[in-house]
Amino acid sequence: MSETTGTRRSRRGFLRAVTRRFGTWPLFGVILVWVVLALVVFTVLGWLWGEGPLWSWQRWLTNWRGAGVGAGSLDLVKVSLTTIGGIGGTGYLVIKYRERASAERAERDAEQNRAEQRLLSGVQQLGSGSPQVRIAGVYSLADVADTYRGEYRQRVVSILCGYLRTQRGEWETAVSEQEGPEQSSEEKVYVSHDGAVESTVLEVLVRHLRKRCEKTKHREAVTQLVEDDQLWCDCTIDLHDAVLTEIAYFRGATFTNDANFQGATFNRDAYFQGATF
């Protein structure tokens, strides 16, 4: 089964490569090639339908026999018009194909440019000094991944994880006097004013990591909130050395690719019940 699938993929890849190569030829050259192919097919069909010895010239020229010696003027006109019409039709089809292929390439390029512009706009919003603008940037980036999917999912995940790994606060020394001034103690506390944006990033990540799962004896049911091709479960989640001050609610999340939490600091609760790695 795997060999058959591999063969089909190799054939499709070969056809795509040939099509791309064909599309770079001059239009006249493409039409000329198709005309020659059409004439060859016209001749081969005459050989298949003809009579006489298998490899005789009479059989090969079955479709051209009307233009042979002794043919009437009406036969000559028929063959000429048929040939001219076939060549013209082939040329027209080639031209329309090139126009369609060019329009599709232009549309794909325009769509990719729109995706890149939206991605860049989201990144710029994420770098804003206003928390409200950064939150809007988080949702804008998630929308890019949901709309264009494919490689944009990993790019958006990497951007969001990279944001959580950046320094968004300061470690400060806090003095605890719960048992009296004479028994006070000092501890390091991470102070951040980015909690609203951080919780938004975590919420977006978890929403795209919750893959549908039925309730079993050892696991609670998981409700999927996005389409199957909008899940980020197969993306690399890199939160190493991140300092999180909000609740990390990864309950029921599914990680089918690398998930790196090495050195991460959770200043509040972190839930991983029912998570699958």
Image: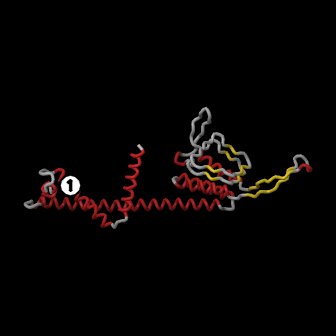
* Amino acid type for the residue under numbered disc 1: Val
Q: Position of residue 121 (x, y in %)?
A: 59, 61
Q: Position of residue 189 (x, y in %)?
A: 78, 53
Residue located farthest toward the left when viewing the structure as drawn: 70
| Residue 62, quarter of picture | bottom left
- In the rendered image, the vertical position of residue 73 relative to residue 263, given as above or below: below
Residue located farthest toward the top when viewing the structure as drawn: 217
Q: Is residue 92 left or right of residue 256?
A: left
Task: State the residue position of label 1.
Answer: 44
| Residue 91, quarter of picture | bottom left
| Residue 219, quarter of picture | top right
Which residue: 40% across, 55% down?
13
Q: Is residue 188 left or right of residue 228?
A: right
Q: Looking at the picture, tell me which residue is in the foreground, 101 or 41.
A: 41
Q: Position of residue 128 (x, y in %)?
A: 66, 62
Q: Position of residue 236 (x, y in %)?
A: 58, 51
Q: Looking at the picture, tell me which residue is in the foreground, 19 or 136.
A: 19
In the picture, which quadrant includes the C terminus?
top right
| Label 1: which secondary element | helix
Which residue: 31% across, 61% down?
94
Count how many numbered circles sit on residues in the image.
1
In the picture, which quadrant includes the N terminus?
top left
Which residue: 87% across, 47% down?
178
Residue located farthest toward the front when viewing the structure as drawn: 3
Q: Looking at the picture, tell me which residue is in the foreground, 65 or 234.
A: 234
